[in-house]
Image (tube, grey):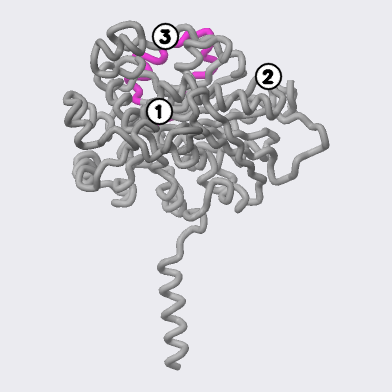
Amino acid sequence: MMLTKVVVCLLATSFAFAHDPEVDMSAVEMIRYWGYPAEEVEATTDDGYVLTMHRIPYGRAGPGPDGECKPVIFMQHGLECDSTNWFANLPENSAAFMFADAGFDVWMGNMRGNTYSKNHVSIDPKKEKFWEFSWDEMAQKDLPAMMDVVLQTTGHQDVYYMGHSQGTLTMFSKLSMDQVFAQKIRKFFALAPVGTVKHIKGLLAVLAEWFLPEFDLWVDVFGQGEFLPNSEIMDLLAKWICGTTKLGDALCDDLLFLIAGPESDQFNATRTEVYISHTPAGTSTQNIQHWAQMVKAGTVARYDYGSSKTNQQHYGQSKPPSYDFTKIKNDMYLYWSDDDWLADPDDIKGYLLTSLNPNHIKMNNHLPGYNHLDFIWGMNAAKDIYQPIIDLLTNEMGGTVKCT
């Protein structure tokens, strides 16, 4: 009897501490865990950053007939995130798995400085110099480097692109300045699209108000390398930003949720542990500072180096130049909400929708009740966003998924 009680006790203890196995998996392991093929493919930028992309070349039904040409969709994560965003839910709710099963060749990018892109051909990531970048470099260097490898590997001339948050900001910016690159993007699906962020809530708004005005204070608190604020500062910010949240303390201890907002009615509670084990995925302090600059300025401009002389050295003018979104000529499909902390509706209606050429906005989808992360993790995203996009593209291609 005593032995039985001990066994029961041990089993109960093991279940109490059991967690989802995906918590400890890499991106490739997570994809294969659900029965999908997974590949890692590297791209090197012209300034030496080695970026790792993840690919799901086909769905669980298999690769299809030899020589079959599958259309490519490229998915790009947001701020402090990585490629796991697109498959952190169950297969029926994850964008990457849904598109793969629908017949697409799915590629997912990872921007410099995150979990899967912390390598350089010559600079040690432990050195501050490695972290001297913001979303500027991601737009101008990371996107074209990854896109060129995708096109070279698949033999395509262009791809469908789906971005979330910073993944939309970087694409808007790149398309506005590079018409050669723009020809490589067949359609642009922008989830929680970001232009200006003057009206945002959360951590970036607080940082812009408290720390940005004093550059020396910013450096003292956050350093100039990877963005790793100390626990005392984060505890203070969490209390200031979150107050009490019905989702509990776990999300308010996570940097990403302090940026994007912890409240959601759509999260699969059984997946929360997976979400927070893979995010935040890392970025530079300079990138966070660039975002904070956008909050203060209310514009979409390049990174401000803080002095007229240094800006002059980088840009040939005393102030950083702005990106001109009116120049974008690609077909765009927007998905946004009134409940988004980061892609704030005032910024979308007051700037983005007035800056983009209306002739190229093919859909303007207002989705009530979505927070910033619901666009990638919300349980309704599959039926509200992913499946409609799959249907649109399938119908465009004549009812079957094939290359055009």
Residue 97 position by quadrant: top right
Three-letter code, disc 2: Gln
In the picture, the disc for residue 324 is 3
Residue that mark 1 sits on? 337
* Amino acid found under the numbered disc labelled 1: Ser
Examine the rendering and report whether any part of residue 152 can be seen. yes
**Residue 205 x/y as whole percent:** 25, 29
The three-letter amino acid code for the residue at tag 3 is Asp
For numbered disc 3, what is the local secondary structure?
A: loop
Q: Is residue 260 visible?
A: no
Could you tell me how far apart the alpha carbons at marks 2 and 3 are, in whole angstroms?
A: 25 Å
Name the foreground residue: 240 vs 393. 240
Residue positioned most to the front: 122
- The residue tagged with tag 2: helix, strand or loop? loop
Within 10 Å of the Cα at label 3, are there few (<14), some (14-19), or many (20+) other Cα atoms? some
List x then y, in percent, for residue 33. Answer: 60, 53
Residue most toward the bottom? Answer: 1
- Which residue appears at 41% of the width and 68% of the height? 16
Q: Which of marks 2 and 3 is nearer the N terminus?
A: 2
Q: Reply yes or no: does residue 310 show up in magenta.
A: no
User: In this figure, which residue is indicated by the disc labeled 2?
Assistant: 157
* Residue 372 placement (x, y as % from top left): 39, 34
Q: Residues within 10 Å of mark 1 (few under 14, many from 20)?
A: many
Name which of mark 2 and mark 1 comes first in the sequence.
2
Instruction: Indicate whether residue 350 is drawn in magenta.
Output: yes
Range of residues picked out in magenta: 344-369
Residue ID at (57%, 25%): 161
